[in-house]
Image (spheres, rainbow, N blue to C red):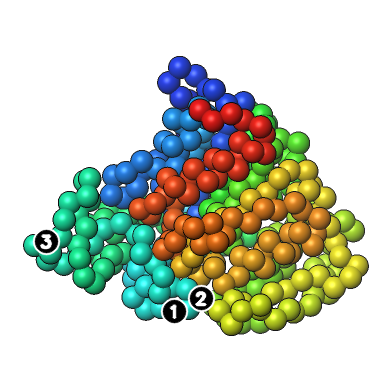
Amino acid sequence: MKNQMYVEELVPAGGARQRYPIIFIHGQAQTGTNWLNTPDERKGWASWFIQRGYTVYLLDQPQRGRSAYTPGDGTLATYSAEYISKLFTGVQRLSLWPQARFHTQWPGVSGDPKNGMMHGRRLIYDGERKTGQMGDAVYDSFYASQVQFQNDTATVQIIGQLAGAALLDIVGPATIITHSQGGPIGFLIADARPNLVNALISLEPTGPPFQDRVTTNNSRIVRPYGITNVPITYSPPVENPATDFRLLTSAPPHPDLSECYSQAPPVRQLPNLAWMPHLIVTSQASYHAAYDYCTVNYLRQAGVAVDFLDLPRFGVYGNAHLFFLELNNLEIAARVGVWIRRKFSILPV
């Protein structure tokens, strides 16, 4: 079946108690299942929000997982177990970026059980933590959930925008929560349906604007429209991004941070994204810790109201890129829930 997207609707027992549902958009190599629970069998973000009265929609991005890829649609790719451990789950072992050494929250351990203790259903070991590596049961469970993905980024964003807009046309106004590679898709959906996205929450969205940093450092423009690879609405319009954007480079405010691109005057605005409030959430030990502030600054310069939940500044420590699956995942979900309630004057439930 072509031109379709799998979407699962989950409604709280007794019916929704919150006005706006939440649409979750996963990141690269993942599916909607990654929001349901954690690889060590704890409650995931979808369950947490359902218990607080939200209807949630879990999707598999087109040409991914249950939104079946059809031969001829393009080239598929996948992440190796070593790659995922290096960048996402075991980042503290290699410290490829300065913040990586702070990573402590990935679940699961390996070593001698005699040196461990039970904490709930998890076995926590003293001494050196060797989490997030092949051979650890929790890591192996997580890696089993990873799937192949369409390798053409522009195609992924175009079909993700079309499918997401069609979903909003069916379910009506909603809050969107995206992660990583799903971030640009969230921006594009909000651009296509600004009247139906009441808030956009981006968990470490692909960035920084225009370039790749930290994991791949080069001067090549990889996102010609700043926050996306494909056209998004600017005012004045962008006809040719290679010539229409005049970019400035700003030095980082700290040696552990990345330099940023901003627009030189006159600054083009993102009028459709200005319709709704935005939240960007960034963890302490992720490679995003070096540059998500660039995305925040770029959006603000383009007229978008963005709140920045930089987790260590709010007393939440030790997380890397997959923090919605880590040991303190529900503490972070609760902070996002508070932001939603404050934006829409919703009473706690």
Q: Residue at x 52, y 35 (%)?
A: 57
Three-letter amino acid code at disc 3?
Answer: Pro
Lower position in the chain sequence, tag 1 or tag 2: 1
Mark 1 or 2: in front is 1
Q: In the displayed structure, does residue 193 sit left or right of residue 258?
A: right
Quarter of the image for residue 146 reads bottom left
Quarter of the image for residue 250 reads bottom right
**In this view, which residue lies farthest toward the front?**
315
Q: Are marks 3 and 2 in contact (CB under 8 Å)?
A: no
Three-letter amino acid code at disc 1?
Answer: Leu
Mark 3 or 2: in front is 3
In this view, the residue in front, 101 or 87, is: 101
**Label 3 crowd (10 A; few <14 / some 14-19 / many >=20):** few
**Residue 247 horizontal/vertical position (percent):** 79, 75
Residue corresponding to mark 3? 113
Residue corresponding to mark 1? 96
Q: In the displayed structure, does residue 136 sit left or right of residue 78?
A: left
The numbered dot on residue 215 is 2
* Residue 194 showing in the rendered view: yes
Image position of 296 with respect to 163: above or below: below
Task: Tell me how far mark 3 sits from mark 2, CA to CA.
Answer: 34 Å
Mark 3 or 1: in front is 3
Q: Are marks 1 and 2 in contact (CB under 8 Å)?
A: yes
**In this view, which residue lies farthest toward the left?**
114
Three-letter amino acid code at disc 2?
Answer: Thr
